[in-house]
């Protein structure tokens, strides 16, 4: 099989069988499709001895919308390549690629079935002690080792070309920076939110900040981003954390990934107000989420500065104080992108189950009002923060 065709349970199973790499020759295999993401097919192929692999295939359109939204298959190449690059510098937190076929847009990955997707776990009120440290480690290592601090200018330019990802970036550009601030048929929010949404559209200071964040997204190839760090892109267990799904990867501003992640923790924080009725349980979850954000920000900063001190190859960038100054700007971007994630997940096309699963309309609306306000305030106040503690205090001041 070499020409593109969308797989089904039978053909996905045959494809894996014919590769002959993952199971003994006489293994009895079964296969089922279980993808519930916005874009792709995801199959699990397993034998009777508990061995299994995951086969992911890109469709030539966005699954969540249908064939009316065509989408490049090249995103499968990007995703497999980003996983390999990130795996080179942070194997402990990156899902392993076992095989890739660009023509079929197929990637075979290690099965992380003994772990669970973070979003579902947080929605059920489960917590993970090492989450903040692990995510910070992944983001610090991947962002540092593909930045100008570490790579030569020639290496970096070649990689920037390899990871140009215009079609997927264009989705992000529209969904993060355009749609929520305009009248657009892709937007999705209840009529009762209209007043608050129209205030966003009319807030000139906010729109200038959004333009600045979009401009950086366009033209700041600081590092090889994952590009879609929401809590559905993270597998967790008690001890481990692994990133999947970097099909939106490209060279962009470092703060985008960290901001998206913190944004998703804050979406869950606000959603717990509508999900959990017992006050002590809600308080525990809130304090876990805030503590995880704090650990994540602090660990990211410490690890990044340690890497800069010990591994910066560029002579100019070794100037004392430069890494600290660079990181301060990254943290300001982080808050801004965090705010855009909160807003676009509340009123744009792609929502989060954290909020959408709240059945009570009144409670859900109250959560949506909070996430919109929080997003707006983080964007407007990002530049007044000069340390991770400033950021943390800013968050606290709007959620308490
Ligand atoms: C049409 S794609 C919508 C969203 O799903 C992806 O996971 C990205 O977050 C994107 O913005
Ligand atoms: Mg995804």
Image (cartoon, helix red, strand yellow):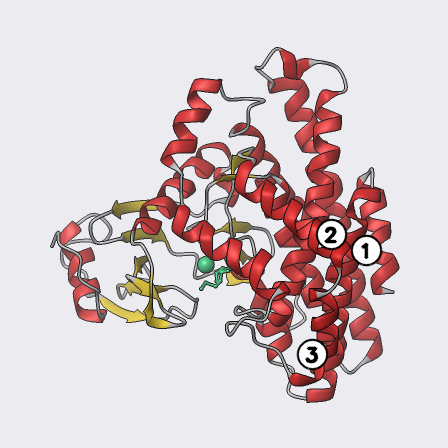
Is residue 364 found left or right of 68 in the rendered image?
right
Eye-nearest disc, 1 or 2: 1
Question: Sequence order check: which comes first, mark 1 or mark 2?
Answer: 2
Q: Which mark is residue 293?
A: 2
Label 1 residue SS: helix
Q: Look at 62% across and 53% down and name the residue there.
A: 260
Eye-nearest disc, 1 or 3: 3
Where's residue 344, x and y in %?
A: 61, 64
Question: Sequence order check: which comes first, mark 2 or mark 3?
Answer: 3
**98 vs 266, nearest the viewer:** 266
Q: Look at 58% across and 30% down and name the residue there.
A: 144
Give the CA distance from mark 1 to mark 2: 10 Å
Q: Which residue is mark 3?
A: 194
| Tags 1 and 2 touching, CB below 8 Å | yes
Is residue 87 found left or right of 63 in the rendered image?
right
Where's residue 49, x and y in %?
A: 29, 62
Q: Which mark is residue 313?
A: none
Q: Residues within 10 Å of mark 2 (few under 14, many from 20)?
A: many
Q: Residues within 10 Å of mark 1 (few under 14, many from 20)?
A: many
Label 2 residue SS: helix
Label 3 residue SS: helix
Where's residue 350, x and y in %?
A: 53, 68
Q: Look at 43% across and 19% down and name the residue there.
A: 154
């Amino acid at each position: 099989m070499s020409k593109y065709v969308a797989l089904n349970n039978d053909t996905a199973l045959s494809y894996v069988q014919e590769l002959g790499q993952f199971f003994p020759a006489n293994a009895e295999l079964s296969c089922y499709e279980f993808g519930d993401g916005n874009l792709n097919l995801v199959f699990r192929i397993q034998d009777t001895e508990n061995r299994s692999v995951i086969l992911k295939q890109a469709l030539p359109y966005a699954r969540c919308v249908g064939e009316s939204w065509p989408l490049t298959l090249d995103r499968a190449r990007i995703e497999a390549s980003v996983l390999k690059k990130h795996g080179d510098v942070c194997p402990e937190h990156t899902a392993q690629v076992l095989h890739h076929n660009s023509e079929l847009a197929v990637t075979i990955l290690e099965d992380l079935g003994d772990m669970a997707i973070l979003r579902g776990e947080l929605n059920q009120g489960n917590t993970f002690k090492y989450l903040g440290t692990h995510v910070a480690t992944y983001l610090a290592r991947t962002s540092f080792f593909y930045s100008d601090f570490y790579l030569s200018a020639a290496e970096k330019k070649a990689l920037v070309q390899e990871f140009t990802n215009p079609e997927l970036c264009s989705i992000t550009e529209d969904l993060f920076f355009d749609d929520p601030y305009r009248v657009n048929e892709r937007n999705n929010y209840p009529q009762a939110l209209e007043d608050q949404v129209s205030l966003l559209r009319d807030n000139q200071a906010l729109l200038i900040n959004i333009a600045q964040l979009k401009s950086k997204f366009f033209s700041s190839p600081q590092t090889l981003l994952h590009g879609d760090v929401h809590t559905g892109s993270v597998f967790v267990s008690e001890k481990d954390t692994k990133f999947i799904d970097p099909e939106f990867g490209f060279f962009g501003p470092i703060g985008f990934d960290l901001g998206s992640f913190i944004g998703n923790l804050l979406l869950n924080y606000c959603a717990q107000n509508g999900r959990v009725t017992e006050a002590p349980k809600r308080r525990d979850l809130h304090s876990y989420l805030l503590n995880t954000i704090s650990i994540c920000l602090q660990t990211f900063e410490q690890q990044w500065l340690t890497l800069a001190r010990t591994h910066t190859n560029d002579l100019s960038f070794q100037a004392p104080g430069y890494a600290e100054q660079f990181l301060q700007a990254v943290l300001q971007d982080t808050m801004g992108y965090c705010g855009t994630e909160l807003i676009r997940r509340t009123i744009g096309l792609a929502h989060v189950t954290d909020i959408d699963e709240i059945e009570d309309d009144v409670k859900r609306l109250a959560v949506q009002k909070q996430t919109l306000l929080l997003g707006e305030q983080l964007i407007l106040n990002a530049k007044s923060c000069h340390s991770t503690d400033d950021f943390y205090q800013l968050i606290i001041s709007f959620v308490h």
